[in-house]
Amino acid sequence: MQTVRNRKTSKPGATQTETVRDVATLRAKVREWRLNGESIGLIPTMGALHEGHLALVKAAMRTCDRVVATIFVNPTQFAPSEDFESYPRDEADDIAKLNALSTDLAFMPNVDEMYADGFSTSVSVSGLTEGLCGADRPHFFGGVATVVTKLLLQSLPDRAYFGEKDYQQLQVVRRMARDLDIPVSIVGVPTIREADGLAMSSRNWYLSPDERAVAPALYKTLLEIAENIDRDGPCGKAIDAGSTALAAAGFGPIDYISVCDAETLEPLERVDRPARVLAAAYLGRTRLIDNVAAG
Ligand code: AMP
């Protein structure tokens, strides 16, 4: 007889994380769990795992019987000038962290497994992807939407978990899953921060000690903008003050600071509905992004 494991009563460290590198084995594992009546949660990541990623794993653990984390540095979401080659990678450390949480499976395909010879399909989400990060990184959301669609179809999870840290990405994935009738519920998880407010990110590794000391100014500025909008009304003035504060702290260039509708990401003049303040700015050579709720 097959047993249904109750995730909520299993102890941390009780399950050894299985590493899988090919889609066929991933599918076989998921089929086995499904036959057992177990639910599945998926956490797509690019690795170099930190507490932000692990918060997604923990959220999945609370509601799913089986948890699959994927680690794949996806080349199609990097422009040739970007950091694909130097992006931090530490497989052994990632597996140890997933193991410590009793994650069931780490799916770690190589590029050929994901993009076979002749690969020629892409998923593109219009509207939502055109502003903010999409304006300066036009390749980015196509790469993300395509790889997330593949990961969802490969693992067919009940729920997939994404961080609010990458707020535009979360909305794009929600739209894409809805538009393509992918039977998955997309769950957003609040941003995990360092004690000084800096949003955890694999790219924080790039910061020099001096830059690291300045980096929390991004979050602080976003909070100030959200507060000023609540008090004053029009967004323009608050954004200008925020931009000046970021430049004075040492950020530059600033890609964008914007106040947007929380769902459609349409820019707002006044906050008359749930909104988000979002920014992307360089600190030295490192591009940091962050966002907070407003309204
Ligand atoms: P990445 O490995 O950067 O592609 O991120 C994988 C997932 O982890 C995405 O859904 C991110 O939004 C999420 N994530 C990254 N950093 C954080 C954070 N500090 N807090 C919450 N989620 C995060």
Image (cartoon, rainbow, N blue to C red):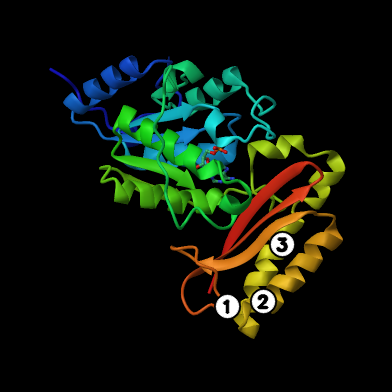
Residue type at tag 2: Gly
Real-space CA distance between mark 3 and mark 1, rounded to the nearest whole angstrom: 21 Å
265 with respect to 289 (left or right): left
160 with respect to 239 (left or right): left
x then y, percent, for residue 246: 78, 61
Closest to the observer: 119 or 220? 119
Residue type at tag 1: Glu
Eye-nearest disc, 3 or 1:
1
In the rendered structure, are the residues bearing label 2 and label 3 in contact, judged by CB atoms less than 8 Å apart?
no
Question: Which residue does the image show at 76% across and 72% down from the upper left?
Answer: 241
Give the position of the N terminus as an image quadrant. Answer: top left
Q: Looking at the image, can residue 110 be seen?
A: no
Determine whether the beta carbon of the residue marked 2 sits less than 8 angstroms from the nearest atom of ligand 1.
Answer: no
Which mark identifies residue 220? 3
29 with respect to 96 (left or right): left
Real-space CA distance between mark 2 and mark 3, rounded to the nearest whole angstrom: 18 Å
Question: Which residue does the image show at 33% across and 27% down from the upper left?
Answer: 154
In the rendered structure, are the residues bearing label 1 and label 2 in contact, judged by CB atoms less than 8 Å apart?
yes
Question: Which residue does the image show at 42% across and 18% down from the upper left?
Answer: 116
Question: Which residue does the image show at 63% across and 24% down from the upper left?
Answer: 89
Q: Can you identify the residue that label 2 sits on?
A: 236
